[in-house]
Amino acid sequence: METETAPSPAKPAAFIKPLPRRGAIRKLTRTFGYAIAGTAYLFRTQRNARVEAVMGILACGFGIWLHINRMEWAVLTLCIASVLILEGLNTAIEATVDLACTERHPLAKTAKDVAAAMVLLASIASLVIGCLLFVPPIWAKVFGR
């Protein structure tokens, strides 16, 4: 007669995940802290990031007023996030270039200009998408069509 043996206490069963150790939780908390510090730096030092965030909030206000559907909310959220993400990357690239290159250099200028151009491109695309999302329903509300 065979008997089943329970898994050894030193080796948990394959389907049971061990709880994270305190060090892992502390490390995760620290990681979130760095991200929050970076976000705070972005909004504290970059006027364009603040303007973009306000425009995003206004766009969300229009979305609420116009009762846009889930897919439109997804597109709007992606647009707002894309512009803010690119603004953050632009800020990071500018800081890195400033750290690495103290004198004027054509490649440093190129890196900064291209990063800024990507933010501008995302902003223009988001403006076009915002017009596609909002102009028809606003037109219908104002002119009753």
Image (cartoon, grey):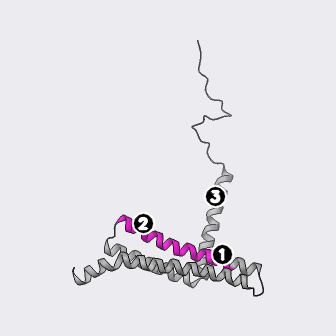
Q: Find residue 105 and report its image quarter.
A: bottom right
Residue 28's tag is 3
Looking at the picture, does residue 55 appear above or below residue 35?
below
Q: Which residues are magenta?
A: 69-94
Report the amino acid beneath label 1.
Answer: Ala
Q: Decide if residue 119 is on the left or right side of residue 69.
A: right
Residue 33 screen position, x and y as percent: 63, 66
Which sits earlier in the primary sequence, circle 3 or circle 2?
3
State the residue at coordinates (40%, 74%).
Answer: 60
Mark 3 or 2, closer to the camera: 2
Residue marked by disc 2: 74
Kindly check if marks 3 and 1 are in contact, taking CB atoms under 8 A apart as contact.
no
Residue marked by disc 1: 92
* Residue 11 visible: yes
Q: Decide if residue 67 is on the left or right side of residue 87.
A: left
Which sits earlier in the primary sequence, circle 3 or circle 1?
3
